[in-house]
Image (tube, grey):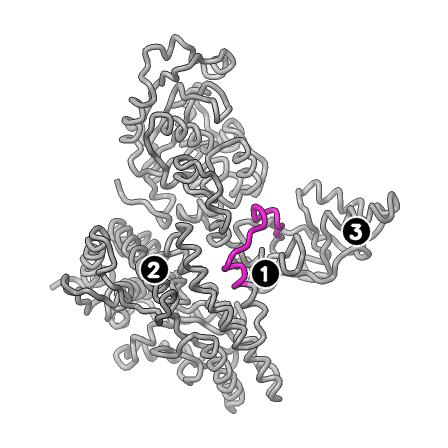
Amino acid sequence: MPHINRYTPLADLTAVVLDTETTGLEVANARIVQIGAVRVEQGQIQPAETFLSLVNPGIPIPRTATAVHGIDNAAVQAAPPFATVKARLDDFLGNAVVVGQSIGFDLAILLRETRRIGSHWEPSHFLDTKLLYAVLSGDSREHSLDDLMAKLAVTIDHRHAALSDAWATAEIFIRLIPLLATKGIYTLGEAEARCNAQTGILERQAREGWFDATSVRPEEAWIAGRDRDALARLDPFLYRHRLRHVMKSPALFLPPHTTVEETARQMEAQRRGVVIVGDEKRAQVWGIVSERDLLLALARKGAAAAACRLESIMTESVISLPQEAFLYRALAKMQRAQIRHLAVTDAANRILGTLSVNSLLGERASQAILLGDEVSEANDAADLARARARLPLVARELLNNDVDSIDIARVLSFELRELIGRASVLAERTMKNAGAGRPPVPYALQLLGSGGRGEALLAAEQNIALVYESEDGAGVIQQWYSRFGEHLTQIVQESGVSRADSVDVRNPAWIGSLASWRERMHEWRQQPSHWPTAFAARIFDGHLAYGNAELDAEFHRVVREETRRNRALGMAIAQSALEYKRPAAEETEVDLKRSGLMPITAAMRALAVYHGIAAISTPERLAALGSVGAIGSAERDRLDDVQSRLLGWLIRQQIDDFEADRHPSKTLNIQNLSTLERESLQSCFEQIRMLPTMVRAGLGIRSS
């Protein structure tokens, strides 16, 4: 069975669709009487691969349960106990993704049955068709299996039989995959994140004791019995998901002359707790009104409040955050501003939706929340430096709570981009105070390298490029941005981000108009050997840190247009992978970035550029390259695992360095690893050694 991870496309999944029949619906007391399952491979049901077994529950089956599924005490008298059935079920499941309708109930029952026999089991990945449909429809109501069968034209012969219900759910799941793709949901990780954001449904399920992995690891909730105590200090949900996963969308817009009575009617009909006062089509916003504002108006004016207009009770200051911001950012901003709702905007600052503090599953605080707030409010480089000093604490906090190393790197990268963005605001302020005025034309500031890819560690460096909108025959615009670049570089350096071995905007080669960048890309395409490839290749990893989003998108389009399908360029970009030398087995210290992460990054960057793939992060490039057939699915999964392991070791090493008051190193002390970890490290190096062959094949170069 192929390895499955969060980057596996939904259409490529190996899944087992499962259903149980039980003695009742109370999780604490219910016992399993039947298990049915069917396998799905790459979007197709496998009719020959099914699982069906009665289970002797060891207790009498209530008549009310028999009336539903038809299984009585006589039917299970000779059936095997759960302990016997579990061994067969484990073999059937393998490492497949577990799918089901209201699967949280089935998992809760299975985990309790497993605990009763003194065994251990945890599903690594699972999906609920009920939640997937909620993601697709935007409908927060819970739909039954019968509802989804009707909506998706699925029919079966017999309901409330485990195998029949599993088969129906499999048919629903298969129909949902292409529909989810129309919403931009292609991978297992994207589906899991969007399902986990259905907080209303999940909270109801959690209250009834259903299995919920959005905040609690299975062994914490079901084996050690600590329930949610492990999250007293931190909720990883806030660091893994962005506002777009949780926001109510679209936002409810109403004109300012709308009455309180009509507003209440609209809010109830559309299940909204807040209204944006404005004109959505014209992108005009005048204020915001919440349910609390309506209640205050009624308390103050009584029945007369019903005829009041929104403009008389609205709050004119509308606080917002971009949809790509992490949830902990929103919580910090709402806590500081003492508000319960904020607006969520797109790249053009148009309001897409709204977010309530209730959507964040309660109020929590942590080092990362404090960090996010301090960066946003920094007034000088010293403020940024104090905020940045929290990063090791953030990383340790996330690591201690078993957040995956790739997710930790994403948080560190997001904060680095936010720091660069805030530094840009401060640099603009410095220019204005010096009499140079505001920026002469729109610009986009790119964070390159690991920070752009979302793979930054604690020892981040300045890798910044700048593109501005128009041509500049007289050099006035270039001069303004050169001075701006001097201020920006100084602020960022004083905040603690090193300039060593990096690219920054004090260098004229990294500032220019869109047209000049096009010329540079064209020149590099023609003569890749004339460029300092190790530096120049980072332009393909650029992520907007500050500035105009439309210009940023056009810049990336130009870069892809000028560089795709060029084998010589691909070979130049992949140089560190093609020249890879595996560290000797007897070495006690290894530069894990140079000997591990960089070759993988270079190889996937080169193949992505050659194939015109827009993805920037290495995991996303691996997934996309696997989808277009540039690399094999097995290679994709192995390299994804290698990168995750290498990042984990380096993050732990750098945290230890900080806590020992050492400069964070890229060198891993192998002697600090366990025997198993050393063997794993050598296996990682062996996988990386295969990169040259993979790159040449992906570039269409036949081996001689």
* Amino acid tagged 2: Arg
Q: Position of residue 49 (x, y in %)?
A: 29, 28
For the residues labelled 1 and 2, the Cα–Cα distance comes to: 31 Å
Say if mark 1 contacts mark 2, CB within 8 Å: no
Residue sitting farthest toward the front = 660
Label 1 element class: strand
Out of 77 and 503, give the one closest to the viewer: 77
Q: Which is more toward the observer, 64 or 216?
A: 216
Q: Nearer the viewer, mark 1 or mark 2?
A: 2
Q: Position of residue 500 (x, y in %)?
A: 36, 79
Whole-angstrom CA distance, mark 1 to mark 3, is 26 Å
Residue at the spot of label 2: 652
- Which residue, given by chain and number where applicable, does mark 3 sit on? 258
Reply yes or no: does residue 364 show up in magenta: yes
Badge 3 crowding class, 10 Å Cα cut-off, few under 14, some 14 to 19, many 20 or more, is some
Q: Earlier in the sequence, mark 1 or mark 3?
A: 3
- Spot occupied by residue 26 in the image (x, y as percentages of width and height): 51, 24
Which amino acid, by three-letter code, is at mark 3?
Answer: Thr
Is any atom of residue 337 visible in this view? yes
Which residue is disc 1 drawn over? 321
618 or 59: which is nearer to us?
A: 59
Q: Image check: 287 left or right of 8?
A: right
**Amino acid type, label 1:** Leu
Question: What are the residue bounds of the magenta stretch?
Answer: 355-372
Q: Earlier in the sequence, mark 1 or mark 2?
A: 1
